[in-house]
């Protein structure tokens, strides 16, 4: 089963777009926000001295609804964050969203992994119980195997540790946490309107699960650390500390595994080499510098420059362009009602122009008058003939966001019985379906004219394999027209 098929099957259990696999990045942001919020509380009550570290953390258990709950949320949000990040990484790789124009986003996300592990492991040190003692000694010995460290870090934990060490650890823990926030900001710079928050129902459900875990299985400190004796660990957090047993047993192998994993992730966008789609092209004579293509580009690939005379002109960065066509759908000059023999818009995809779309529409409607026109995302449901009586003109698009809304009106005026805009299940280019819906509903420029009868067009989602459902929508438009 492919990842897409698995997600699609899971959609049935999570209605109204709340499938967590489709919002892993946003769920990671939610978990990070919980970590920062609860971490601020813990920072305020923490005593960064050798004698006070363990009592200040243990005392939280006496405040089950204030301190204890906050500590539990902090721990379980940390577990959730690492799980969401790894699942997000796996999903993007499985869907091929790590190559070509997405390479920079992939590479800028990789530093988040070591930062998260440093924050997670360092956070256990601060509790200074037996588990913290194990985490400190195991990770210190692991660091000592590096040539530049010199082998003296673990000696800090031979008999006693100075107070300044805990102040330093607290500084590193909070400082690297802020680096995570900065790295996340940098990671999202190549995306327009990134989803930083999951849908409300999913966010509340996730928060409810974490609260339930914090209440049912509260986080408690173990006995205080005793340097010079072997730490006895009552409970172990495998989600956050899974590297330490390997590092404790075979530190060299652990380093090789970490370096190999990071190298494989860094090289993943380069192999296998995928052919790049043709980037959007600007026609200077037809571009009026309105900036709609700039506003609608999901990957910040289009910008405005000032040309001679002071007018604005759109410019495309080919390395960032996804060839999704959302900019072509946003261009006001892409209307098929223009009388030009050849339809040239201000910005367009060279391999799938609006002029070619208009020519195909005319030719197919001439051959099949009174058909239903289907503008379909090529990643969604395909054409189907499994329902009798359905006669349609099928016009595939890179994304439904590529469709200028005037093409709906134009198809009806050319004799089409009805028009269906068929998006894929989860937009490959993030914002295509959303923009198509808003344009057709008159909420976004360019708008579909209000005079176009709403009963003569539909916009639907149809994943690959849902051809029958899409065919029923098409057939319904034909029956409605009699």
Image (tube, rainbow, N blue to C red):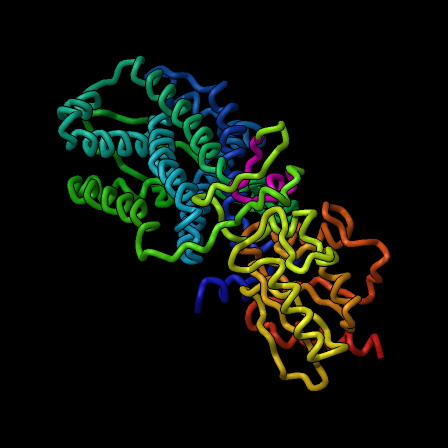
Asked which quadrant contains residue 424, the reply is bottom right
Say whether residue 88 is left or right of residue 427.
left
The answer to whether residue 196 is visible is: no
Determine the residue positioned at 51% across, 52% down: 323
Query: Which percent across, then down, holds residue 206?
Result: 57, 46
Determine if the magenta segment contains residue 449. no
Determine the residue positioned at 49% across, 63% down: 4
Which quadrant of the rendered structure holds the C terminus? bottom right
Q: Nearer the viewer, residue 443 or 159?
A: 443
Q: Nearer the viewer, residue 232 or 191?
A: 191
Q: Nearer the viewer, residue 308 or 60?
A: 308
Total label count? 0
Which quadrant of the rendered structure holds the N terminus? bottom left
The answer to whether residue 400 is visible is: yes
Q: Is residue 259 above or below residue 464?
A: above
Query: Which percent across, then down, holds residue 356?
Result: 60, 63
Say whether residue 267 is left or right of residue 379.
left
Q: Nearer the viewer, residue 105 or 413?
A: 413
Asked which quadrant contains residue 450, the reply is bottom right
Query: Which percent across, then down, holds residue 68?
Result: 51, 31
Q: Which residues are magenta?
A: 291-307
Determine the residue positioned at 76% across, 46% down: 443
Query: Which percent across, then down, holds residue 374?
Result: 67, 69
Q: Is residue 163 above or below residue 387?
A: above
């Amino acid at each position: 089963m492919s990842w897409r098929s698995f997600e699609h099957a899971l959609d049935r259990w999570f209605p109204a777009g709340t499938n967590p696999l489709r919002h892993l990045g946003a769920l990671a942001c939610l978990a990070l926000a919980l970590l920062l919020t609860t971490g601020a509380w813990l920072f305020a009550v923490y005593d960064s001295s050798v004698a006070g570290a363990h009592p200040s953390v243990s005392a939280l258990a006496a405040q089950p609804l204030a301190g204890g709950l906050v500590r539990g949320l902090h721990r379980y949000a940390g577990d959730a964050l690492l799980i969401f990040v790894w699942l997000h990484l796996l999903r993007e790789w499985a869907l091929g969203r790590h190559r070509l124009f997405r390479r920079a986003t992939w590479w800028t996300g990789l530093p988040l992994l070591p930062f998260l592990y440093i924050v997670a492991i360092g956070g256990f040190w601060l509790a200074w119980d037996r588990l913290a003692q194990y985490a400190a000694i195991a990770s210190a010995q692991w660091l000592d195997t590096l040539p530049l460290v010199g082998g003296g870090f673990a000696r800090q934990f031979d008999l006693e540790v100075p107070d300044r060490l805990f102040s330093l650890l607290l500084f590193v823990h909070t400082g690297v946490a802020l680096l995570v926030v900065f790295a996340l900001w940098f990671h999202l710079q190549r995306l327009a309107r990134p989803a930083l928050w999951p849908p409300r129902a999913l966010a509340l459900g996730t928060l409810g699960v974490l609260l339930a875990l914090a209440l049912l299985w509260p986080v408690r400190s173990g006995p205080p650390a005793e340097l010079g004796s072997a730490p006895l660990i009552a409970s172990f957090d495998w989600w956050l500390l899974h590297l330490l047993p390997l590092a404790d047993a075979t530190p060299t192998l652990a380093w090789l595994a970490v370096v190999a994993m990071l190298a494989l992730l860094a090289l993943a966008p380069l192999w296998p080499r995928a052919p790049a789609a043709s980037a959007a092209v600007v026609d200077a004579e037809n571009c009026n510098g309105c900036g709609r293509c700039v506003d609608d580009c999901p990957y910040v690939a289009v910008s405005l420059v000032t040309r001679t005379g002071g007018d604005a002109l759109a410019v495309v960065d080919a390395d960032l362009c996804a060839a999704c066509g959302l900019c072509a759908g946003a261009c006001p000059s892409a209307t098929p009602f223009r009388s030009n023999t050849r339809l040239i818009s201000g910005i367009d995809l060279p391999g799938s122009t609006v002029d070619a779309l208009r020519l195909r529409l005319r030719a197919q409607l001439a051959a099949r008058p009174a058909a239903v026109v289907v503008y379909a995302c090529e990643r969604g449901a395909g054409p189907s003939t499994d329902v009798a009586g359905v006669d349609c003109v099928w016009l595939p698009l890179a994304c439904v966001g590529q469709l200028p809304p005037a093409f709906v009106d134009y198809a009806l005026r050319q004799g089409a019985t009805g028009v269906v805009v068929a998006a894929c299940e989860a937009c490959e280019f993030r914002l295509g379906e959303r923009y198509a819906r808003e344009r057709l509903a008159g909420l976004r420029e360019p708008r579909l004219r209000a005079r176009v009868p709403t009963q003569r067009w539909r916009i639907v989602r149809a994943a690959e394999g849902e051809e029958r459902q899409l065919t029923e929508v098409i057939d319904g438009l034909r029956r409605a027209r009699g």
